[in-house]
Amino acid sequence: MTDTAVPLTTKKDWSSDQEVRWCPGCGDYSILTAVQMLMPDLGVKRENTVFVSGIGCSSRFPYYMNTYGMHSIHGRAPAIASGLAVARPDLDVWVITGDGDGLSIGGNHLIHALRRNVNLTILLFNNQIYGLTKGQYSPTSEVGKITKSTPFGSVDRPFNPVSLALGAEATFVARTHDLDRKHMMETFRRAHDHRGGAFVEIYQNCNVFNDGAFDPILARDNRSDNLVPLVHGQPVRFGKEDQLGVTLDDQGRAQVVQVADVGEDALLVHDETRDDPGLAFQLSRLARGPFEPTPMGVFRAVERPDYGTAIGDQLVASHARQGPGDLQALLASGSTWTV
Amino acid sequence: MSDTIEERSTNKLEQVVIRFAGDSGDGMQLTGDRFTESSAMFGNDLATLPNFPAEIRAPAGTLAGVSAFQVHISDHDILTPGDAPSVLIAMNPAALRSELHDLTAGGTLIVNSDAFDERNLAKAGYSTNPLTDGSLSDYSVYEVPMTSITLEATKPTGARPRDAERSKNFFALGIVSWMYTRPVEDTVAWIEQRFAKNALVRDANLLAFKAGFNFGETAEIFPPAYRVLPAPLTKGNYTNISGNTALAWGLVAAGQLAKLPVFLASYPITPASDILHELSKHKNFGVRTMQAEDEIAAVGAALGASFGGHLGVTTTSGPGVDLKSETIGLAISMELPLLVIDIQRGGPSTGLPTKTEQADLLLAMYGRHGESPLPIVASKTPSDCFFAAIEAVRLAVKYRTPVILLSDGYLGNGTEPWRMPDVSQLPDISVPFASEPNGAEGEFLPYLRDPETLARPWAVPGTPGLEHRLGGIEKEDVSGNINYEPANHEHMVQLRAAKIAGIARDIPLVELDDPDGDAEVLVLGWGSTEGTIIAAVRRLRESGCKVAQAHLTHLNPFPSNLGDVLRRYPKILVPEMNLGQLSRLVRAEYLVDAKTYSKVQGLPFRIDELEAAIGALLDD
């Protein structure tokens, strides 16, 4: 807990000695690599870093990090991590979760951790399927999904994780995907450096139960027309020749347009620091699912006091006002008498 | 008002049990609290029993909305709030109808006669007015027009009648304070302070209180005032304390004694919320409190804080324990300290939120999947909650285990005078964190155990070289790595069980109270029934019966001498506010013929009930 210089480390220092046991070809491998490669660059110490996960394929993640870690129970990682982060604001606490863990059984904890702005870096691996239980549909699966538990197609509508996080007024919300290590590392770095609750949705391929779910936007040939990069301060545009862009229609909805039709000046300029999450929310609704032009990058990054620091500040203020706690005086703080 | 107690002609009483009853909105709990406080300051021994509905404001004037507060004051050591009141203050017909059946024959009944109009009588289900139909002839009835005198007395404040009327509880308090010669100065000062922000209300309450006191003195309808002299309590400094406050302070103390910052995460639930409220005030002790989004998050956050080296605590009642079970199991598997406090209430489901019960013992014992033992500690009196909290924390940190502390609504809301301990005499319960690798090759082995306690090292994030991963998947002994081997699992199940069972060596023996050593019946209790059991046993002994008595504060593991104690007696009676949970446990554990005496009415046992039950077994 002493604050000395951060030793130089490599990816290997951050990798535990445990054999990684995801299915061959799983997107989780590339996410793990991105995180392990990023850690030496963050200027943090292994002993001050904690990975907390719930249950699911992605939640095995902490076993593979040579840091402190906890593989907890289904859906509860944000709650457990909140307690840790509030008790120990000096730590870097990461939450690893998935679409089932974070949005189904643990949805309540996720939205409240974000609402409170607990200092957590939350990585949600979204593969739109339950992998560990072998292939049931998840709360991000598209309507009509045929799975073992929905042989006639699912009938319930999915969550859009980025919309949900923005609705909870998360102070940092981003999306990245498992095929672009550089983009992942940059996104994770920003999420880590953000003080408060940072939420990153990662499109992640489950090659066993939902292979190719994100191909409509992530396959090489599709990226230019369907992957919309969000760059702070820049007009939102994409396409092989940057011929496409995003504007707001007369109802205030984000829409894809031909730049030639509207002119460059009409394009929406992305501002991740806007206090109001409304515009970021519109961008999150641009695609009805990962088969239409889908924004990638940081949707929102605003500064707010984080929950643990605010609680710590109350302790300090109370100490300054009342002095250190005197237990004997506390016992005698009501009416007392002597016999 | 200037009379001193000595000057007045008074009748001495050894003790009295008084019950205030009125509408939920009538301020009966406040009135009872205030009377209790002034009796405590006066030096009486006392015990209280608040009894109120779950509805915040049930329809006015109805039976459902009756709120009552019973206080037992005495010039000698007492153990319970009293079986039955000998004085009942009824603010309306519903309160009379709901509470009269408990009033002792010949008891004193003081009613607000203004409230006995046709409408209120009908609401309470009276077809005739009990004040005039002769049905109260067994009691000494004092009809006092409390509402109209209060309105008259508070006129100088200019308060509107609707507001002024609300001071009538202070008028009632004034009458009772006069009747039992309570010192008035404390109450006057208290009203001045409590209502300092609202001069109108303050003045109205003061005028009503004084009017009530003066009414008692001058109306000449009451017998001379009574005196209940101070009780010869052990010398020392006293305060009047409720179980929930004692528990909250016990947690503050335990944090200091364990040298750990207290981290409380809770979700509001009756009757446990007061602990969250109390601890939220004491941030200067370094206490962090978090009102979580639900019961599961509360226990999760507490466990996360424990992982970080804090004293993780969550407070709840039965329904919350149901929800926390999975996380408690995780804490058992990860072998981290965690304190789960259950202020038991009537169940199942929502049950009786504001009423007491002891029916969560088997839940605490077995309410998790898999083999998942944990220590259980139960508090036995309101002030004992302070020490029970320290003991529960001691076990949690020493053995790196979740501990369930069982209190109940009766203890939580009930109060008693407490001789405050000298905190410098409280034990050091701190344990060191792991600071160095413990493996032969310089590695850290998170499941390498202390050979004596079987506790594993508690290594907190921030400690270089001890990075490790915990989780709910079965772990390999010593290394803590994931392990699914059959033999390892059995070994770990046995180790976890042995660790908890071994705590029996580290807790006090059960104390047997059998003066001549030849009693035929042993009464075995646990938790909040102690006072009533001892009182009943005392009475039986006074009438020449031989009865032994023992009381448990550790429910898992049991004290190591419990089997020997039980086997000495041919007859064992276990009074419990459930259908026989402790008796089932001791029968299974020790093969003894323990009989259950059960009560599940949301109310504590009465002394006479227990006396009769024990007597019946003696005669059996």
Image: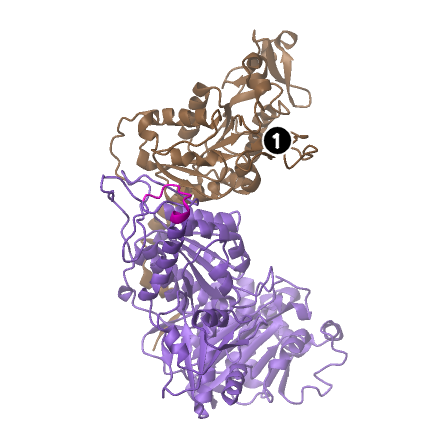
Chain colours: A brown, B purple
Residue visible at 53% across and 53% down? B323
Residue B477 is situated, as x and y percent measured from the top left of the image, at 34, 47
Look at the numbered disc 1 and give the secondary structure of its residue.
loop
Secondary structure character of the magenta stretch overall: loop
Q: Nearer the viewer, residue B220 or B534?
A: B534
Q: Categorize mark 1 by other alpha carbons within 10 Å: few (<14), some (14-19), many (20+).
A: many
Q: Residue B159's image quarter?
A: bottom right
Q: Tell me: residue B93, above or below residue A88.
A: below
Residue visible at 32% across and 48% down? B458
Amino acid type of the residue tagged 1 in the rendering: Ser
Q: Is residue B1 visible?
A: no
Residue visible at 51% across and 49% down? B296
Circle 1 residue: A141
Residue B233 is situated, as x and y percent measured from the top left of the image, at 36, 80
Residue A301 is situated, as x and y percent measured from the top left of the image, at 48, 27
Q: Is residue B409 visible?
A: yes
Q: Is residue B422 left or right of residue A249?
A: left
Q: Tell me: residue A55, above or below residue B381.
A: above
Q: What subunit carries mark 1?
A: A
Q: Which residues are magenta?
A: B479-488
Q: Nearer the viewer, residue B284 or B270?
A: B270
Q: Magenta includes B128?
A: no
Q: Residue A249's image quarter?
A: top right
